[in-house]
Image (spheres, grey):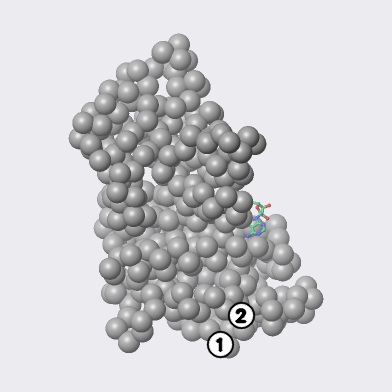
Amino acid sequence: MADSHPLPQLAIPMGDSAGIGPEVILKALSFPLLKDVAHVCVIGERSLFEAVYEHLQKQTGLDVDQTLANPKNLDFLEVGLKLSPIPWGKPSAATGAASFQCLSTAITGALEGRFGGIVTGPIAKSAWKAAGHHYPGQTEYLAERSQTSEYGMFFVGSSPYTGWQLRTLLATTHIPLSEVPRQLSPELLTMKVRLLKKTLQHEFGIEHPRVAISGLNPHSGEQGQLGREEIDWLIPWIREMRSQHPDLTLSDPIPPDTLWVGPGQAWYGPRDKTAQPTTYDAYLALYHDQGLIPVKLMAFDRAVNTTIGLPFVRTSPDHGTAFDIAGKGIADPTSMIAAIQLAANLVRQRSG
Ligand SMILES: NC(=O)C1=CN([C@@H]2O[C@H](COP(=O)(O)OP(=O)(O)OC[C@H]3O[C@@H](n4cnc5c(N)ncnc54)[C@H](O)[C@@H]3O)[C@@H](O)[C@H]2O)C=CC1
Ligand SMILES: NCC(=O)COP(=O)(O)O
């Protein structure tokens, strides 16, 4: 397939069919601009998408010609699912098994070179568990299937107000908060910084990246008074990294709250138009919510989650399954559109 088609080849596994995945896929693929960006193959059953299309048409009064792609006009890779009627808002072992099978099929296609990238629909981790698939998320399954030990969860969002791009890597991801200090180590951060530098240089064209590192404790420990990780190993590790990577600028550990003041100003535009916010090319957050609270405050409707370090491109909208609004026709596809655009750009970058 890849040889006969000049556009990047992307697979979109549908995600959990009880959620908004199929809806945001149909909405995103109705954008004519995306036709020139990538060739897309939806992984899931055409009949399921037809049922979603008909439901949204009948139940919500959407002007379907304007807002939804007609499944008749899309390419599907079917995997033999039997999931109708759609269980709106009610994930189960069956929907978990189905979303897992769709992702698995997409990964096989990417590993065989049929797809340059995968744009995942949102899944419910609990439904995967109910189906017997004990992965913390799609990221970890993608890494295992591609035998990738060094990978990272990286979020990218462009401001609609200023055009500034917020890029955030999470050092640890789907683990309990109590585990974070135990899992953080100089070795783990060294790997994450190496991956981040490579990504910024090769995929975002930033030759000498500037990276801000968050402290772990309030006020970055306040000289050990509020926590010792910064003094005991984080600051010595940063010094060592600076000597190993002269082409990279690394900040000291910045207090985890004030770290986000500059990005907030750069995202919304500074109040004082003459003041230049202090910003970095990327932000290394030490745990999931330290990075994702600011990302979602600023960019929930448009940030993209991308897994760096894989042998193929993987992006995803930053939101989840949104079971509370499934089937209502009100899901916003902006993040899915951005995920498709970023995946296409990254595939192009990789193919030179
Ligand atoms: N990449 C993935 O597969 C992800 C999956 N999840 C999964 O999603 C499930 C629900 O997680 P939550 O924390 O509730 O997050 P969520 O993102 O699904 O929903 C949070 C809130 O935002 C709203 N929302 C989300 N996406 C929206 C959209 N496109 N348009 C309009 N409103 C939207 C929802 O209605 C809800 O009120 C969980 O099972 C979680 O594991 C969460 C994040 C990423
Ligand atoms: N909150 C981010 C998230 O849950 C990403 O999940 P996944 O992409 O690993 O499935």
Which of 241 and 232 lies nearest the eye of the viewer? 241
Is 27 rendered above or below residue 299? below
Which of 134 and 210 lies nearest the eye of the viewer? 210
Is 253 rendered above or below residue 208? above
Query: Crowding at label 1, few (<14), some or many (≥20) Cα neighbours within 10 Å?
Result: few
Instruction: Please report contact status of discs 2 and 1: CB closer than 8 Å, yes or no.
Output: yes
Q: Mark on residue 73?
A: 1
Q: Mark on residue 167?
A: none
Query: Which residue lies under the disc numbered 2?
Result: 69
Residue 94 in the image: state x and y as whole percent: 55, 67
- Residue in view at x 37 percent, y 38 percent: 211
Residue 296 in the image: state x and y as whole percent: 58, 46
Does the image show residue 118? no
Quarter placement of the C terminus: bottom left
Left or right side of 220 for 238: left
- Residue in view at x 43 percent, y 31 percent: 214
Instruction: Look at the numbered disc 1 and give the secondary structure of its residue.
Output: helix
Residue lying farthest to the left in this orientation: 244
Which of 206 and 144 lies nearest the eye of the viewer? 206
Number of numbered markers: 2
Residue type pointed to by label 1: Asn
Left or right side of 272 for 191: left
